[in-house]
Image (tube, grey):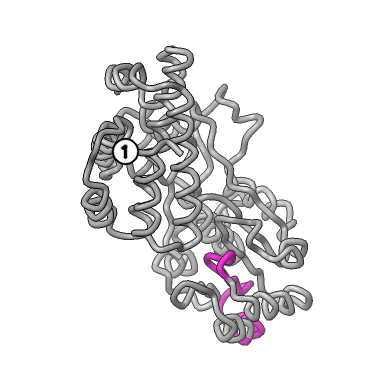
Amino acid sequence: MGERPFLSSPLNGTKGLDAGRWVAPAEMLGRWAAAGRIGHAYLFVGPAGMGKRAAAGQLARLLNCERLDAGRPCGQCHACVLMTRNMHPEVLVITPSGATLKLEQVREAHQTLLLRPAVGRRRVGIFEHADRLTIPAANALLSVLEDPPAYAVLVLLAENGQAVLPTIRSRCHVLDFRPWPEGMLAARLEQETSAVPPRLAAALAQGNPGMALRLTRGDDLLAGRVRVERFLEETLSGASLNAYGLAADLESYTRDRQGTLDFLDVLQLCLRDLLVWRIAANPQLLINRDRMGWIAALACRHQPARLLRALSAAAYVRDAVRQNVLRRLCLDLLILRVVEGD
């Protein structure tokens, strides 16, 4: 699988930035591999953008690289090159068929994983969105985990670990992909070519390295913030507005599920800053520090309880979108709750 070096490589130049208390999951896997402590099944849990897929690719390299260098994949051998191109025969990636991972997919993967490796040391089966397994598929996967193939390592990726059956979780080594410390993420971003100041990108990303990379590479998340600001000015005022037209406009603008989640992420950050400013008026506590003027002007027009209800509404709707509730219905609900303050 293709590597994203930012997410899968150890951190450099981060001395004094909580490095002693926090270790990137991909680096932790490297330490376990060097100590010969790789298990047969892992569950990587964390939001999108936290590097779960990159870490799974790093694990596949650790298990199959032909010339490990100090416990790290060389990146140049035939096996590493094949994995970078997503062409290694021992690495199997199973993605949902439609909205879910289905029974037939798990059965087919199991038959492949049972085969002895042909060109590498270990087969690696990566199940993306394991929190979307159907019940029959989950039961089939549980049977695989109860009697794991001798030459295989299974890696399950999930945004919502609680949606994975407890019996599956109990048979996996669970690795939580938690937000990076802001200082460490900013230091790492300084090694990238950036269209946004690293410190600002780290603050806006809230410890999410995938989002931070998108910001530094000129992603439209910052442009989306302008859209969010306009949305808040229109809805928080409580004035009459064309809710139907606004929902239709947002549905078109956000394009798909991920675009809607991105919009809601930025919306929550802006609402959080409005609430913080309304209560404390401290610039150091803001995430959108470069928008302090706008935040101060809008926050002073609304009571904390009003802003808190809007923030709760955004969080509620985001959860609904993650659970694949119809996007338009979610956007209608968002506008209704923010406008009415319920």
Residue 148 in which image quadrant: bottom right
Residue nearer the viewer, 194 or 298: 298
Residue 318 picture location, percent across and down: 46, 49
What is the x, y in percent for residue 272?
Answer: 44, 29
- Residue 281 visible here: yes
Q: Is residue 296 left or right of residue 312?
A: left
The stretch of residues the image draws in magenta is 111-132
Res 123 quadrant in image? bottom right
219, 123: nearer the viewer: 219
Which residue is painted at 42% across and 53% down in the image? 4
Q: Is residue 63 above or below residue 102?
A: above
The percent coordinates of residue 58 (x first, y second) are 54, 57
Of residues 41 and 95, which is closer to you in this image? 95
Residue that label 1 marks: 216
Q: Residue at x 42, y 46 (%)?
A: 210
Q: How many neighbours does mark 1 have within 10 angstroms: few (below 14), some (14-19), or many (20 or more)?
A: many
**Foreground of the two, 126 or 252:** 252
